[in-house]
Amino acid sequence: MSTQTRMKPSSGLPALPLGLVALIALLLAWGCTGASQGDNYKTLLVPGGSLAYALTGSGPQGQGQTPGLTVVLLHGLGGNRGVWSKLLPMLEVSGRVVAIDLPGHGDSQGAPQRDWSVASVAEDVLALTRRLDLAPMVLVGHGWGAQIAVRVACEAHGGVRGLFLVDPMPQVAALETSKQRLYVEGLLGPTDPEETYQWLARPLSDGLSAPEYDAHLQGLRALGRSVLVSVYQGMFSYDALADLTRWRGAMLALVGDANTGPLALHNMAVDLPFQEIAGKGHFLMLTAPQQLAEALNSFVGLLEH
């Protein structure tokens, strides 16, 4: 794995209907869930309800010791903190590691009527990090979680030292409104909701074990179609590129070799360094945990020295 030469964006999106199908696969590729959690988690009240989290490590102890950076893990849509289970044993960091269940996922609350915008979810995550005194932090976000991480970093007022984005969501705010509307109509189209969940999950099955695929389906079912629509509408209205422009700290993106479209975040954000992992799909914490761990360990290590 090496840092890649920045790829030149193509001239446009494929025409519908094949273009819409490709976009659907691309968007949903950032939400696979991992195995069910078997850790000792805690919950904390935040403005939007309560968030579940699991914390490991404590960093250096004793008077005069400088705490290491806290690594905060934010999963994608339909996931939970268990998606990082393969990665955690491979991390070699001196500080704490906190895996959070985002609202409505895993053991966290998320009422269907809540505000599902990126800014609102990020506010909940930021509240948790402040209550737990997690700064200084490195935020690790996958897909939708990458959008949340970018927003938190911009609002943390110096509490975040680095952004590590795992196959981040593309800049879907730049998508034509008509195509956004077609996508939402696709979510709501089938009479049977199960058809919607299968429709979302099936393009993501490459590289996933049967239990991982089943867990992804279960995560989508738990959210329900109305919440999925609200989350996607929130993503469509979030300008991640503008927030990345505001961000002045260290950052790195790890991307799968299918994440190369004109709206790919690393193609649009010219200052975002990236590394490509070939042949492992979008769910790098599941399909390439060793490579992901090596890159993250190196990233955190450079920030601590």
Image: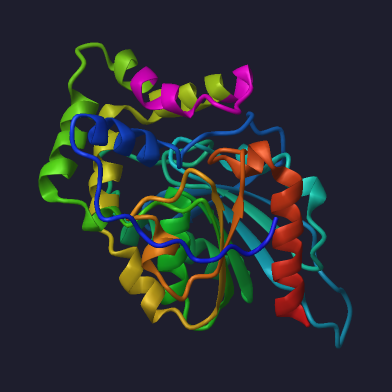
- Residue 34 on image: x %, y %: 60, 33
- Residue 235 on image: x %, y %: 29, 51
**The C terminus sits in image quarter:** bottom right
- Residue 193 on image: x %, y %: 28, 17
Q: Is residue 46 above or below residue 84?
A: below
Q: Is residue 39 above or below residue 215?
A: below
Q: Going 54% across and 80% down the picture, which residue do you hit?
A: 249
Q: Based on the picture, tell me whether residue 202 belongs to the magenta stretch.
A: yes
Q: Is residue 236 left or right of residue 288?
A: left
Q: How many marks?
A: 0
**The N terminus sits in image quarter:** bottom right
* Residue 69 in view: yes
For this orientation, the residue located farthest to the right is: 62
Q: Going 37% across and 50% down the picture, which residue do you hit?
A: 261
* Residue 237 in view: no
In depth, the one of 292 and 273 nearer the eye is 273
Q: Based on the picture, tell me whether residue 133 belongs to the magenta stretch.
A: no
For this orientation, the residue located farthest to the bottom is: 64
Q: Is residue 33 above or below residue 159?
A: above
What is the span of residues highlighted in magenta in the rendered image? Answer: 198-212
Query: Looking at the image, what colour scheme do you see?
Result: rainbow
- Residue 78 on image: x %, y %: 45, 35
In depth, the one of 253 and 147 nearer the eye is 253
Q: Going 45% across and 42% down the picture, which residue do you hit?
A: 30
Identify the main secondary structure in magenta: helix
Q: Is residue 305 above or below residue 102?
A: below
Q: Going 80% across and 82% down the picture, which residue do you hit?
A: 66
For this orientation, the residue located farthest to the top is: 192
